[in-house]
Amino acid sequence: MNSILTVEERILLQSLGCRSRQEALKVLSDMVGRVPVSSPIFSTIAGLIIKLKDASFDFTYEMRSDSGLADDEAEML
């Protein structure tokens, strides 16, 4: 199965430690109001909120550390 999340989005979600899509949406929605629009992470957070609201994907699969990464990409992290 291929991941629909970018590496940055997946790492952000994993670092938040949210156990569900709803919890992640709540945390990210709170964060987006506090991050300056000019910050590089703002677009990552905003895009991730949209994906979590609109896209249907397996949240648990996406949170696995190796989901969607090729072996060489996983080694770089």
Image (cartoon, rainbow, N blue to C red):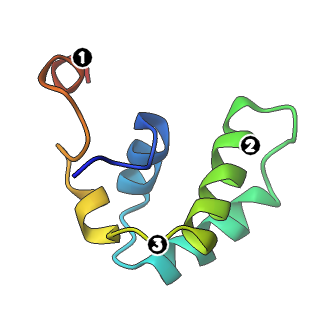
Q: Quick one: SS at disc 3?
A: loop
x, y percent for residue 10: 40, 47
Q: CA distance from mark 1 to mark 3?
A: 28 Å
Side of 36 relative to 65 (left or right): right
Examine the rendered structure and indicate whether residue 53 appears above or below residue 49: below
Q: Which mark's residue is nearer the viewer, 3 or 2? A: 3
In the image, what residue type sits under mark 1?
Answer: Met
| Residue drawn at the location 26% of the way across and 24% of the way down | 77
Residue receiving disc 2 = 42
- Which mark is on residue 76? 1
Examine the rendered structure and indicate whether residue 64 appears above or below residue 55: above
Examine the rendered structure and indicate whether residue 43 appears above or below residue 53: above
Contact between labelled residues 1 and 2, with CB atoms less than 8 Å apart: no
Contact between labelled residues 2 and 3, with CB atoms less than 8 Å apart: no
- Which mark is on residue 56? 3
Mark with earlier residue (2, 1)? 2
From the viewer's side, name the closer residue of 10 and 35.
10
Local crowd at mark 1 within 10 Å, few (<14), some, or many (≥20)? few
Q: Which mark's residue is nearer the viewer, 1 or 3? A: 3
x, y percent for residue 48: 60, 55
Side of 24 relative to 34 (left or right): left
Mark with earlier residue (1, 3)? 3
